[in-house]
Image (cartoon, grey):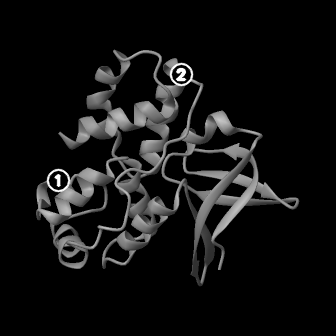
Amino acid sequence: MYDYFNGKLTKISPTSIVVETHSIGYLINVANPYAWSSLMNTTVKIYVHQVIREDAHTLFGFVSEAEKALFLRLISVSGIGPKSALAIIAASDNEGLIQAIDHSDITYLTKFPGVGKKTAMQMILDLEGKFEKIGADAPSLGDTRHNNIALDEAIEALVALGYKATELTKIKKTLETKTDLTSEAYIKQALKLMMK
């Protein structure tokens, strides 16, 4: 089982990045791919978790061990798969998530894509009080691109994570009033708006 990769970041897509190490490019699914933009063609360290199924071997990547630990806790809950766990992590509000679980805030938890009332209740049942050792906030990565390109990339990434286009259309006008934000910043702002 892989723990982390040190390699060259060679490609970014709405749902994943490619890290090349020893002439092999590893496709790694990450929560906010465009957050890695400023590191393109540089050597990066990414923590990974491999999910093996009959039809696929998939790698999921994280910026820190704390983010990886949170992902592993989330996928241990019945009803939360790796894609849903990444969508939850993409909100970059780990502290809010932990508080919602510890205070049985089902309304907050059901705002994440793929999390219904039953799954939210299961999250509370399985994870309440189990986050003491996980850091509240994972470090973020820089991004030098901005303006409409950055917003378009952010919307594309959110759709890939499972958010509905109708939801995103409602908040896009608000996001357009914010200028000079990176793709990562737009994603964070969008998720905050949808959590309200």
Tell me what residue is drawn at x 21 percent, y 75 percent.
122
Residue depicted at x 56% and y 39%: 34
In the depicted structure, whether residue 177 falls above or below residue 138 = above
Instruction: Count up the numbered dots.
Output: 2
Of residues 141 and 23, the one drawn nearer to the viewer in this rendering: 141
In the picture, the quarter occupied by the C terminus is top left
Under circle 1, the secondary element is helix
Apparent side of residue 175 relative to residue 117 in the rendered image (left or right):
right
For the residues labelled 1 and 2, say whether their Cβ atoms are less than 8 Å apart.
no
Q: Which residue is mark 1?
A: 108
Image location of residue 101, percent across then percent down: 19, 64
Q: Taking 165 as reference, is 90 above or below it?
A: below
In the rendered image, residue 1, in percent from the top left (x then y), is placed at 65, 80
Q: CA distance from mark 1 to mark 2?
A: 29 Å
**Amino acid type shown at disc 1:** Tyr
Q: Report the residue marked by disc 2.
A: 146
Name the foreground residue: 113 vs 182.
Answer: 182
Residue 113: quarter of image: bottom left
Which residue occupies 37% across, 64% down? 134
In the image, is residue 179 above or below residue 13?
Answer: above
